[in-house]
Amino acid sequence: AQSVTQPDIHITVSEGASLELRCNYSYGATPYLFWYVQSPGQGLQLLLKYFSGDTLVQGIKGFEAEFKRSQSSFNLRKPSVHWSDAAEYFCAVGSGGGADGLTFGKGTHLIIQP
Amino acid sequence: GAVVSQHPSRVICKSGTSVKIECRSLDFQATTMFWYRQFPKQSLMLMATSNEGSKATYEQGVEKDKFLINHASLTLSTLTVTSAHPEDSSFYICSALGGAPKNIQYFGAGTRLSVL
């Protein structure tokens, strides 16, 4: 069975500082990996995805993530956070070419300090 | 593009009543829709997968008679919580496949169900 671990429940970062959110997955085959952001009152928004190819993927809002198969990780990064980045971030893994239901991590709540 | 609308956003009902939640893909045809449940401070848990015109596939441990799913058209799936009880109180989120790019799930904003 596939699983996703996000070890950090909460992370506090100063505005303008860099950010890294950790994600580890367990999956027997080639994983389809996603990062979503959830803001209150809004649906989950896809930040980026990895299906194959270049292991460093660029997403929206200045986010990027790196797939490391040897570490079973897909960490999300941003060089300089903005107050509007405060939200809940979910890492997810899927199968079936991305067409099956997703398995989510428990999420990381990002707090931005002024 | 690829907008998913979920309605209602919040519903409060009495124990024993049934509640219907709608999930619509507004600008694309959704070949597959998914229903998730999110407990407070927890992850999203997949409840079921529905394909237009066929019966939904439920995840292990999800009562199909309690959570009725209908996917009657390519733009609408409904989740009916039958004979709701307080333990069914949760945040229900739908997603849909079929937009562009492919194999990306687009999520609704969720429905907060409170059963009194």
Image (tube, rainbow, N blue to C red):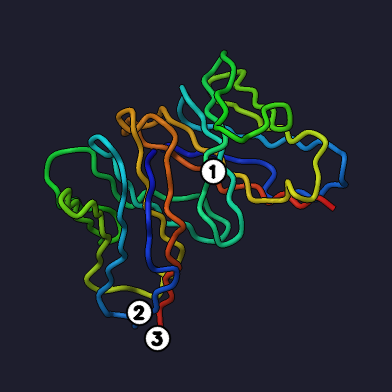
Query: Looking at the image, which residue is at 34% across and 33% down?
Result: A95
Query: Marks 1 and 2, how far apart in space?
Result: 28 Å
Question: Which residue carries the number 2 mark?
Answer: A13
Question: How far from the left and from the top, in percent, is residue B76?
Answer: 59, 26
Q: Could you tell me which chain the residue with mark 1 belongs to?
A: B
Question: How far from the left and from the top, in percent, is residue A47?
Answer: 33, 52
Query: Marks 3 and 2, how far apart in space?
Result: 9 Å
Closer mark to the observer between disc 1 and disc 2: 2
Query: What label does residue A114 carry, if any?
Result: 3
Residue B62 appears left or right of A13:
right
Query: Looking at the image, which residue is at 17% across and 48% down?
Result: A69
Front residue of this view, candidates B85 and A2: A2
Question: Which residue carries the number 1 mark?
Answer: B108
Label 2: which secondary element: strand
Q: Quadrant of residue A65?
A: bottom left
Residue B101 appears left or right of B11:
left
Q: Could you tell me which chain the residue with mark 2 belongs to?
A: A
Query: Marks 1 and 3, how far apart in space?
Result: 31 Å
**Quick one: label 3 or label 2, which is nearer the N terminus?**
2
Closer mark to the observer between disc 3 and disc 2: 2
Q: Is residue A23 above or below residue B81?
A: below
